[in-house]
Amino acid sequence: MWKQAIEDAVRITRENIGRFGDLMPHVSGGGKYELNPNTEWTDGFWSGILWLCYEYTGDSQFKEAAERTVESFRQRLAKHEQLDHHDIGFLYSLSSKAQWIIEKDEAARKLTLDAADALMKRWRPNAQLIQAWGPEGDPVNGGRIIIDCMMNLPLLYWAYEQTGDAKYRDAAVTHADKSRRFLVRGDDSSYHTFYFDPETGDSLHGGTHQGFRDGSTWTRGQAWGIYGFALSYRYTRNPLYLETSKRLARFFLERLPEDDVVYWDFDVPVDENTYRDSSASAIAAAGLLELLSLLPAEDADRAALEDGLNRSMRGLVNKYATIGQSEAEGLLMHGSYHVRGNNAPDDYMIWGDYYYLEALLRLEKGITGYWYERK
């Protein structure tokens, strides 16, 4: 089952190399990906898909296309363009770090370390956090964190391992601790964002940007938390991070709908027109695989987590994947980007494609992990 899905994903990716050229896919409308010249926060996912396909097939076509994306990321960092956000980890972990892991290319390693330095420019010592969006001192976003950033912290953990410079690890741990304390609620749900006083670090209030309302649980944010806290545990071995990942995972899986692929928010009223977010289920599945690789065999939650993983992946493969669709550009249908903003509420999402393929390859090949955590 997994192998057929992988082969179809490889076929689509090979065709997309010709379709996309040197541009990057972001989200889609009407079944066609919107392309950009490496200016979006999502562009690392296309690079990551290419590296996954190269590792799976050994086909130099994927390697050459992936290397071209890394060169594009080198130019982007040199120009400091479109990097005024925290998603530098998404961009460079899946591109230049992936190249370092596969090829041990020293230039790729240096580029990834330079990217970690760029991410450290988002560190705000007064508030003790990594600012998500906007310039330093921004009146709205100056003290704002979002749960997505848990997936950017592995770039800093990795930089610490590579250099021995504790500044990277200290910032990542401090931010992870703050995220655990303020983004994860007592009932194991999560805020999308949280605000702090940028000068004092005092907590202000939780909120959302893409969720249904400030107090709701945006499903993609919950999925980022499952994967992100598991990764922080991998690098630090702090058991609180592992427990947090499990708590978020249980909440997510206990609310799977009948077809096992989640709606875009756990609190949104559901009717026949409510949008799904297949990308949230794909992220959660990849995160569950990471979490399960870290749990002891005798863990009391293992069976339930494994069952939820398999349900989620079967739901994606059987009902949301584009398997057999000859003209498809994406791997997963019915992802949502920003429903309340009416921005790509129901189509392909390049991050959904990436995590779907990552999860498939982990299931098929038994590899512990991919570009966030592999050395």
Image (tube, rainbow, N blue to C red):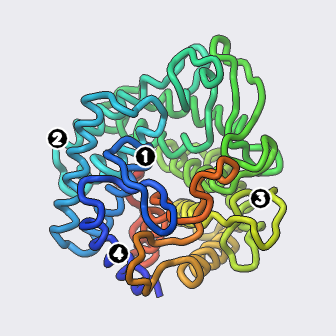
Q: Position of residue 289 (x, y in %)?
A: 53, 66
Tell me the mark number nearer the camera, choosing from 1 and 4.
4
- Residue 150 position (above or below residue 30): above
Specify the label residue 107 is tagged with: 2
Q: Secondary structure under badge 3?
A: loop
Which amino acid lies under the numbered mark 1 shown in the image of this protein? Phe
Sequence-earlier tag: 2 or 4: 4
- Mark closer to the observer (3, 4): 4
Check contact, mark 1 vs mark 4: CB within 8 A: no
Name the residue tied to disc 3.
Answer: 266
Which is nearer the N-term, disc 1 or disc 4? 4
Question: Which residue lies at the image location 51% right of the left edge and 62% below the top edge?
Answer: 29
Query: In whole angstroms, how far apart are the C-alphas of marks 2 and 4?
Result: 30 Å
Q: As shown in the figure, which amino acid type bears the numbered disc 2?
A: Ala
Instruction: Report whether 241 appears left or right of 16.
Output: right
> Which numbered disc, 3 or 4, marks the residue that appears first in the sequence?
4
Instruction: Give, as a three-letter code, the residue at label 4.
Output: Ile
Identify the element where label 1 is drawn: helix
Q: Secondary structure at mark 4?
A: helix
* Residue drawn at the location 59% of the way across and 14% of the way down: 126
- Distance (Cα) linking label 1 and label 4: 22 Å
Residue beneath label 4, please? Answer: 12
Residue contact between numbered discs 3 and 1, judged by CB atoms under 8 Å = no
